[in-house]
Image (cartoon, rainbow, N blue to C red):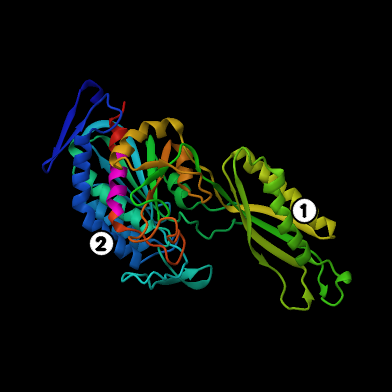
């Protein structure tokens, strides 16, 4: 065990990686070994990323991507599990020395977004989404996530002989949320991280690390924060029931469109007047309203779909109550009724534990060449949070705006114009690898 050693020299293929049992971070020699190995695989990461970008797959459909990943991990001599929680892949790298178990995670799915980047490897793929044929694009950078983790896996596999423990490489499907509905018993089928957890992906894992690329941080900058980092997300579905009639005689009907309009406005007061946002921020957005079939007919009902974002479980539960009360009361004031439901998609808050964050920072700063900053809370959501419910997990962002573009104005994630600077992918692979090794060597 490392606790009995002042240092362990790790040599493979001319690389020497030193571990110090009492150190709080990797030393420069240790990082140099990782850096050399990552730089050697950098051209492959670019090739993998471009191949994946040209062949994106929607949530739950990542068959080709999973095959590419599994074949790569098998060539590295890992124990590989496929079909984990759907199309998920888990590669296990057992080090030559006994020790802890740490995991690294990348998400694989793309989005139903038409690509307008003009890149030579731009996606031309179309696929079925909710019964419609839609264009598909890696508009959130998951292609880069997969490529970076494949690169980290190759770098670390070359050092396995002296690794003090085990590293699991988790390639996850359906982070963006599979289009699922409750079954006959009202249960929502698991997908994404939750499905992989239920399939045993985190068995024996003592910590997990993950990252997300963004064009909206300075190039090569790593952004993190301790505690709540990304918001929890809940779908909102509100059904307003009225009584249909002729548009010329609204007094003979109960207009659910007017009631729904008043509900939308009323919901804005939940955040501005009903929740204590001095504690944590919250966001409520109604993004879709469906109702009616003709210009002069008042329909029987209207359906509204939206999203709730919170950073605190207590506020989340309070928001549930306030949204329900507000919608029901406003609808009732016009003679209509409102039925409020939450789900099926519900992501917890992505929260970096203080202890793990502080312990990981020295290695992160070293691997990122000091380009590390605390960032504000992010109102977007991530199902990496599901992993954090099971084991301590640390999640961070990597700035990679396209070359020549200002990070303040670069197209954000989920945009048809989203792109990254591929030269920053080695930073991602290096930080992931360094965090994993650092965790294994810490007492």
Can residue 185 be seen in this snapshot? no
**Which residue is at the front of the view, 181 or 208?**
208
Q: Earlier in the sequence, mark 2 or mark 1?
A: 2
Classed neighbour count for the residue bearing mark 1: other residues with Cα under 10 Å, few (<14), some (14–19), many (≥20): many
Residue 401, image x and y in percent?
37, 57
- Disc 1 target residue: 328
- Residue at 88 percent across and 71 percent down: it is 252
Classed neighbour count for the residue bearing mark 2: other residues with Cα under 10 Å, few (<14), some (14–19), many (≥20): few
Q: How many marks?
A: 2
Rounded to the nearest angstrom, the CA distance separating label 2 from label 1 is 54 Å
**Foreground mark, 2 or 1?**
2
- Residue at 69 percent across and 63 percent down: it is 303
Instruction: Report the magenta residues as a range.
Output: 424-436
Image check: 132 left or right of 14?
right
- Quarter-wise, where is residue 135 in the image? bottom left
Question: 443 above or below 123?
Answer: above
Task: Specify the farthest residue to the right.
Answer: 251
Residue 239, image x and y in percent?
71, 60
Residue 373, image x and y in percent?
40, 41
- Disc 2 target residue: 47
Question: 250 above or below 40?
Answer: below
Image quarter (top left, top right, bottom left or bottom right) of the N terminus: top left
Image quarter (top left, top right, bottom left or bottom right) of the C terminus: top left
**Which residue is at the front of the view, 409 or 365?**
409
Residue 356, image x and y in percent?
40, 33
Element under label 1? helix
Question: 30 above or below 174?
Answer: above
Can residue 409 be seen in this snapshot? yes
User: Chief secondary structure of the magenta span?
Assistant: helix
């Amino acid at each position: 065990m490392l606790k009995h050693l002042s240092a362990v020299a790790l040599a493979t293929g001319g690389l020497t990686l030193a571990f110090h049992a009492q150190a709080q971070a990797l030393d420069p020699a240790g990082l140099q070994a990782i850096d050399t190995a990552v730089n050697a695989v950098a051209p492959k990461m670019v090739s993998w990323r471009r191949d994946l970008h040209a062949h994106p797959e929607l949530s739950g459909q990542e068959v080709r991507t999973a095959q590419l990943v599994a074949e790569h991990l098998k060539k590295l001599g890992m124990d590989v599990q496929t079909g984990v929680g759907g199309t998920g892949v888990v590669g296990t790298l057992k080090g030559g020395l006994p020790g802890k178990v740490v995991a690294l995670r990348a998400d694989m799915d793309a989005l139903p977004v038409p690509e307008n980047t003009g890149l030579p490897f731009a996606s031309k793929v179309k696929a079925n989404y909710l019964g419609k044929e839609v264009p598909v694009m890696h508009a959130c950078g998951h292609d880069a996530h997969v490529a970076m983790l494949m690169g980290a896996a190759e770098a670390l596999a070359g050092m396995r002989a002296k690794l003090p423990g085990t590293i699991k490489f988790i390639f996850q499907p359906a982070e963006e949320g599979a289009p699922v509905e409750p079954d006959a018993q009202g249960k929502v089928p698991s997908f994404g991280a939750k499905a992989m957890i239920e399939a045993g992906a985190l068995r024996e894992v003592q910590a997990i690390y993950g990252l997300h690329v963004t064009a909206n941080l300075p190039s090569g900058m790593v952004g993190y924060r301790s505690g709540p980092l990304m918001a929890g997300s809940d779908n909102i579905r509100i059904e307003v029931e009225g009584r249909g009639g002729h548009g010329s005689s609204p007094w003979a009907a109960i207009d659910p469109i007017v009631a729904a309009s008043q509900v939308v406005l009323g919901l804005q007061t939940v955040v501005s007047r009903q929740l204590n946002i001095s504690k944590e921020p919250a966001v409520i957005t109604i993004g879709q309203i469906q109702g009616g079939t003709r210009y002069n007919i008042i329909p029987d009902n209207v359906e509204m779909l939206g999203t709730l974002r919170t950073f605190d479980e207590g506020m989340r539960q309070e928001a549930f109550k306030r949204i329900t009360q507000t919608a029901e009361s406003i609808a009732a004031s016009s003679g209509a009724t409102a039925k409020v439901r939450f789900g099926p998609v519900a992501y917890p808050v992505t929260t970096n534990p203080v202890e793990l964050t502080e312990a990981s920072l020295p290695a992160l700063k070293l691997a990122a060449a000091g380009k590390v900053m605390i960032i504000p809370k992010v109102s977007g959501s991530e199902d990496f949070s599901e992993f954090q419910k099971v084991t301590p997990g640390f999640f961070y962002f990597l700035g990679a705006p396209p070359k020549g573009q200002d990070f303040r104005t670069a197209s954000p994630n989920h945009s048809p114009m989203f792109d990254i600077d591929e030269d920053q992918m080695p930073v991602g692979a290096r930080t992931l690898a360094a965090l994993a090794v650092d965790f294994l060597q810490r007492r």
